[in-house]
Image (cartoon, rainbow, N blue to C red):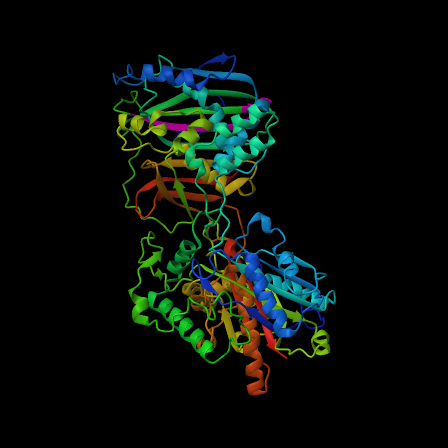
Amino acid sequence: MSTTPSPVPSTREAVIIGGNRIPFSRAGKKYVRTSNQDMFTAALEGLVARFGLQGERLGEVAGGAVLKHSKNFNLIRESVLGSSLAPTTPAYDVQQACATGLEAAIAVTNKIKLGQIESAIAGGTDTVSDAPIVVSDRLRAALLDANHAKTTGAKIKALLSVRPKDLAPATPSTGEPRTHLSMGEHQAITTAKWGISREAQDEIAYNSHQNLARAWESGFFDDLVTPFKGLTRDDNMRPDTSLEKLAKLKPVFGTKLGESATMTAGNSTPLTDGASAVLFSSREWAEERDLPILAKFVDAETAAVDFVHGHEGLLMAPAAAVPRLLARNGLTLEDIDFFEIHEAFASTVLTTLAAWEDEEYCRTELGLDGAFGKIDRSKLNVNGSSLAAGHPFAATGGRIIATAAKLVAAKAAETGRPARALISVCAAGGLGAVAVVESV
Amino acid sequence: MRELTVPGAPASFDVTELAQLPSLGGLFAKGLAGSAGKRPKGAVRLPEVAYQVADVDTAGEAEHLAAYQRLLGEPSSEVLPAGFLHVLAFPLATAVMVRGDFPLPLLGMVHLKNTARVLRPVRLGEVLTVRAWAQDARAHRRGVQVDLIAEVLVGGELAYQGVSTYLAKGFTAPDGAAPDAEAPRKEWTAPLPTARWKLGSGTGRAYGAVSGDQNPIHTSSLGAKAFGFPRAIAHGMYTAARALAEVGPARRGDAYEWTVEFFKPVLLPGTVDVSIRYAAEAAPAGSTSGGGFVYEGWRSGKDTRHFRGTIKPL
């Protein structure tokens, strides 16, 4: 199955100027009754203000939300119209589950590289607190029948088929449509297959909170986050948590698998509200406007795995995408200075790393000659990731890209050598998107 | 179950032509009334008769098919899934079982296993010949088991063959029938699931509505209690048909075999953990079919197995 990667065609560069997000907030707290459009507009406006883009016609704004009401069919365009960008800025919606934000960035940077546009914003937003509620299928069918009925009698007849229990609303779930297993249950199966320990997962979670808190304290997020609704920092962050406290939490996923369950609320991401946006452009466009260039968005790869029949774990696609991406760019794991692996669950990070270290897996599943390799853990999510920050699905990509760009810029400035970050985001549907960001 | 190589009922059987497929409602009433009188007495002798209906026009089945597809999760298509063909032929097989000279009681028989083969696709609008008969009454450690065969032909060509094996407890097999070799009972441990089905209390009524199988053990708690179950139980064929739908037309192909073996019943409401996996897990990375699929279902969180089966392209 493995094919020799074609060399990356030479195009001009797409650079990252900067990012902005609102603080992420646990569902049901600060952003209750705040819509996706409110949040994305706020993230966008913060970015516009930071780089003086008022009245500017950008090449494009792309982004999306995973949980989206049908009335938000043009969510991103509507957000642009509510922002101080020129109303002549085109926009479109993207949706690839948790990879939405990164996929939007891949799309707009490709257009920049091809010369179709000069500048773009990519991002995403998600709210669980203001999630759309759907009516039951039976009620929906009755309402549609009544709507299509020609006579009053037929309309009444259609509506009379509604039973009291049909009125119960359905809230969106993270269940996979084909397997009816939640994402957490899927990951619990993968965790059990790879034999990932509870302690290893709690350690990832502990580090995430510690690293994120240190980054906040050091001012790393001062030019990446705009306060919103009275919130100035991510409110899921627990700098005071300890391995002992994490060890006391009861498992919530995989409790019916017959093996000892290891995934808790502490080492799984909470449902979160938030939005993020990242500004990209051609080098020329940034230089003309005297805007800083943090990094270039080098290349990206998406992958999907066959999870429906248990052949592979739901969230394992990045394990396949990263080797392909690095090979195409002539890179190895040693060439990476920062690993930004989205912590959907602590165990997602660990099963991905375990897969890369497993010779048999790399040979049979990834088509490599041997183990892909082991990463230096001190380079992993150095400023925290989703376990501490929270994970408003479509907003996570933008959060990671902005963090990665700032990290490589600082590292290159410090060492005088180019620095690279690898971004990896797993997503529902067995999907994954990964990218390489490099200092300029 | 015996391997059927030659289509059609054994040569000694009389074939009775019916004008149309009988209605299940009437058959169940007859089956209910007749079941009480069918008690074990002497060796079981099956009637050597097959029912056949020619010119079954499926053109009028569009709505029925759509309802079936919606309930089981089959994609919308004009090709009739094997589970739908089973449902289509079920009244004729039931008509055999409610005959006065059929020695086993319709209600109370236990569906042990089912094997179906689709040899060519049957499409909505095609005119079918449907036939059914019972054969091979043989010993089971708890009574006698019998095969109900249903066949569907299109233009004289065999398109579908289903073998449903039922157990009648306490009955005696005909002389000369050797008991099935008893497989040693092995401890069974649940594998990791690939899916989880939450089955509501209305599951039996919903499948009853599309299949016509309104057996009270599936449709009401009281009906189930009358037969010794604590609550209503899911139709075994509902669970098997869901597994078949989950594998889907793209992976099972035009011609396929679909088998299921039933263990403990699924009590409603209930959560069933399911594993639907490639039969040849040694298949190279990225390959999607080949040896077909195996599936199992069990009570979520327990080692209580409900069913297992296979779906294999032919």
* Residue at x 27%, y 25% (from the top left corner): B226
Which residues are drawn in magenta?
A: B153-168
Q: Is residue A413 visible?
A: yes
Q: Is residue A432 visible?
A: no
The number of callouts visible is 0
Q: Front-most of A373 and A46?
A: A46
B112 vs B73, left or right, is left
Tell me the quarter of the image containing the N terminus of chain B.
Answer: top left
Q: Percent position (x, y) of residue B61?
A: 55, 25
A416 vs B223, left or right, is right
Q: Front-most of A107 and B112?
A: A107
A51 vs A423, left or right, is right
Q: Percent position (x, y) of residue A336?
A: 54, 76
Task: Give the residue at the far front of this rendering.
Answer: A230
Q: Front-most of A228 and B112?
A: A228
Q: Name the quadrant containing residue A211.
A: bottom left
The answer to whether residue B40 is above or below residue B222 is above
